[in-house]
Image (cartoon, grey):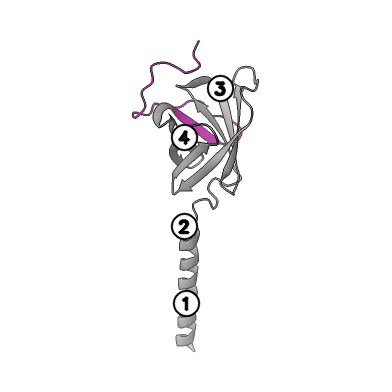
């Protein structure tokens, strides 16, 4: 009887481990699906805040506003997101922008590319509040903001 119970427990543990491993292979599960991220893009668009509303189908919607006045700065944009482990990318529909970065906890940061060229660092925080600052990324060098005075 003990031997049969041990065999059952081994099979149960193997099944649970398999389920856990398969769950880890789904890059969207519990990571960014149906999440809201609020971003700043300090080098290219220093006065604006962007909100990304992620859907579990791999799509997202982006709204942008002036940080000081709250005035919208663009129509709602859309795109696709993908995630593999901590690496996440957002690609805008109809525009050559790519957000390529890493998710660590409730923070997402990396490089914004325009037509394949690094244009700015970006930082985002999960939720409706933007991060307070965005540390410099050594791989991105900017000398002029795109929307500077």
Which quadrant of the structure image shows residue 135? Answer: top left
* Residue picked out by circle 4: 98
- Give the SS element for disc 2: helix
Which segment did they paint magenta?
Answer: 121-149
Locate residue 72 relative to residue 16 in the image: left or right: right
What residue is rendered at 49% in x and 14% in y?
148
What residue is rendered at 45% in x and 77% in y?
10
* Residue picked out by circle 3: 48
In the image, farthest residue toward the front: 94
Among the two numbered marks 4 and 1 on one chain, the one whose residue lies closer to the N terminus: 1
What residue is rendered at 48% in x and 42% in y?
105
Mark 1, residues whose alpha carbon is within 10 Å: few (<14), some, or many (≥20)? Answer: few
* Disc number placed over residue 25 in the picture, else none: 2
**Residue 34 forms part of the magenta stretch:** no
| Cα gap from disc 2 to disc 3, whole angstroms | 35 Å
Among the two numbered marks 2 and 1 on one chain, the one whose residue lies closer to the N terminus: 1
Tag nearer the camera, 1 or 3: 3
């Amino acid at each position: 009887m003990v031997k049969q119970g041990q065999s059952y427990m081994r099979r149960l543990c193997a099944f649970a481990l398999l389920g856990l491993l398969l769950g880890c292979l789904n890059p969207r599960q519990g990571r960014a699906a149906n999440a809201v991220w609020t971003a700043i893009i300090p080098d290219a668009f220093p006065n604006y805040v962007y909100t990304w509303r992620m859907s579990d189908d791999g799509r997202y919607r982006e709204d942008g506003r002036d940080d000081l006045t709250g005035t919208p700065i663009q129509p709602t944009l859309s795109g696709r997101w993908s995630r593999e482990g901590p690496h996440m990318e957002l690609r805008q529909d109809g525009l050559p922008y790519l957000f390529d970065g890493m998710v660590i906890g409730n923070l997402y940061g990396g490089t914004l590319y325009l037509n394949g060229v690094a244009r700015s660092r970006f930082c985002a925080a999960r939720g409706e509040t933007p991060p307070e600052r965005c540390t410099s990324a050594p791989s991105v060098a900017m000398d002029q903001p795109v929307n500077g005075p």
